[in-house]
Amino acid sequence: MESRRKRSRSQLLKWGCYVLALFVCAALQTTPGLFQLGQAKPLLVLPLCLAVAVFEGEFAGALFGTVGGLLWDYAAGRTVGMLALELLLLCFGVSVLVQLYLQVNPGNFAAVSTATALVVLSLDWLFFYYMPGYASAALRYIAFVLPSAVLTIPAALLAFWLVQRIHDGFGIDNGVV
């Protein structure tokens, strides 16, 4: 059985690792030309936030998703708030979905991450390309949105592995066998 101080320190270190990973993912995702294949780039912040939501629960995941969305908005130079709201809702929903219906394994997580990446990218395309009436909006969807969602699969698997290691490494020993 662990002392209260040790549990508190363990939780602080765990969330410090999550925040550090979030900053690294945001920096890598918004670096121009890094991991780019044609016009498409993988999303790194989204799978990390979803993985934290899966392993830490719906409330902590939704809060972490909001912080991740705000950081993503700020790092990408966008209007702050849209991605924060999207990630809040998606992280909460994915956490509940996994708790009620899905097993926690890399295959399910990769499928859910790809679907949520497609939702986020499709909403961005809708609001920033299609609704303003750009001439080649459909081509943008085919050349950027769909490949970016597929490129998110390796990032999702890496985020799942990383968050699982952090979660298991800082687990709380409550003395129950």
Image (cartoon, rainbow, N blue to C red):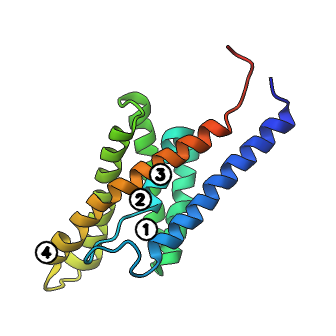
| Residues packed near mark 3 inside 10 Å, few (<14), some (14 to 19) or many (20 plus) | many
* Tag 1: amino acid: Met
Which is closer to the viewer, label 3 or label 2? 3
Residue 78 image position (x, y, % from top left): 45, 79
Secondary structure of residue under mark 3 = helix
Image height of 166 relative to 47, above or below: above
* Tag 2: amino acid: Glu
| Residues packed near mark 4 inside 10 Å, few (<14), some (14 to 19) or many (20 plus) | some
Image height of 78 relative to 175, above or below: below
**Could you tell which of marks 1 and 3 lies nearer the N-terminus?**
1
Secondary structure of residue under mark 2 = helix
Which is closer to the viewer, label 4 or label 3? 3
**Could you tell which of marks 3 and 2 lies nearer the N-terminus?**
2
Residue 82, disc: 1
Which is closer to the viewer, label 1 or label 4? 4
Q: Which quarter of the rendered picture does the N terminus lie within? A: top right
Say which of 6 and 136 sits in front: 6
Residue depicted at x 53% and y 58%: 66
